[in-house]
Image (cartoon, helix red, strand yellow):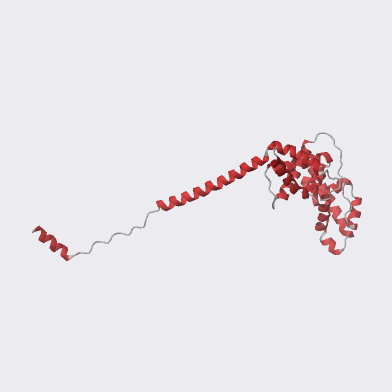
Amino acid sequence: MSEQTSEALRLWFKRVEPLYPELFNTAHAICGNYDQAEYALRGAILEAWAESAEVGMGFREKLRGAVREEAFDQLKQRSGEVDFTWPGFAETGNDAIQKQLNRESLENQRILMLRHGVGLTAGRIARITDQSASQVRSVLNRFESRCRRNLSGPERSRFDALFSGIARRQLAARAGVPHPAAVYRAFEAEASRLEVPEHRLSRVVFRILMFLMALVCAVLLWLFAVLVQAPDVEPQSAAPDRPGATVETVQAAE
């Protein structure tokens, strides 16, 4: 792998780092297991790189979507029992919500995180936790109603936003997240085999050529339309009768 390629990988990975804790914690909440979450994180980063994901408005959402799908794949491929290592909620900063969270089981806390933090539907949470969708909805509704009883009036009306903010901050926490250097080394080794920079260049060149070809076709179609258009020819008017012409013709005949 060339030095230029190594530098490109480092620069790209640096743009991932601000989202790095959220990506791992999302995978950890879905998988429930630390090692599988780290594997899902590495797979998501590699997939985003291989698909030439550029930093922009959709960059974060692309990574979030990739890590969710990689974590789901880990669950599908799971064989046998694995250790459940997800730690649950830390201190939330809201007394009423924290007291209620402390009363919830770790599995219920995971359901709350998957709904309010990761943003999954009750049906998808049910498949992850081996429960029915109605059971998941029951956990969510009970927690919300119990919290609302202990919240102030203004807080009750904005419970969803309040708790979603708590869950998102928990996802962004760096405590317990694997060191980025270890994940980067694995990413660099895999990405170098994919030869992604050349792949990116070929895709850019292909897009430019396609654009130029489309432009040339548009110009040719326009020229063809101009050339085949029938000209507006005005009908020739009949020549006026010239009396002198008849006289001259008669005289010539004589």
- State the image quarter where residue 80 is shown: top right
- Counting labels gives 0
- State the image quarter where residue 253 is shown: bottom left
Judging depth in this view, the residue of 69 and 177 nearest the camera is 177
Residue 78 position in % (x across, y down): 80, 36
Judging depth in this view, the residue of 1 and 90 nearest the camera is 1
Position of the N terminus by quadrant? top right
Residue visible at 81% across and 39% down in the picture: 36
- State the image quarter where residue 203 is shown: top right
Residue 139 position in % (x across, y down): 85, 50
Residue visible at 88% across and 57% down in the picture: 94
Q: Is residue 99 left or right of residue 116?
A: right
* Residue 130 seen in the figure: no
Residue 74 position in % (x across, y down): 78, 38
Q: Is residue 195 left or right of residue 207?
A: right
In this view, which residue lies farthest toward the front?
3
Position of the C terminus by quadrant? bottom left
Judging depth in this view, the residue of 228 and 208 nearest the camera is 208
In this view, which residue lies farthest toward the top?
80
* Residue 106 seen in the figure: yes
Residue 88 position in % (x across, y down): 87, 47
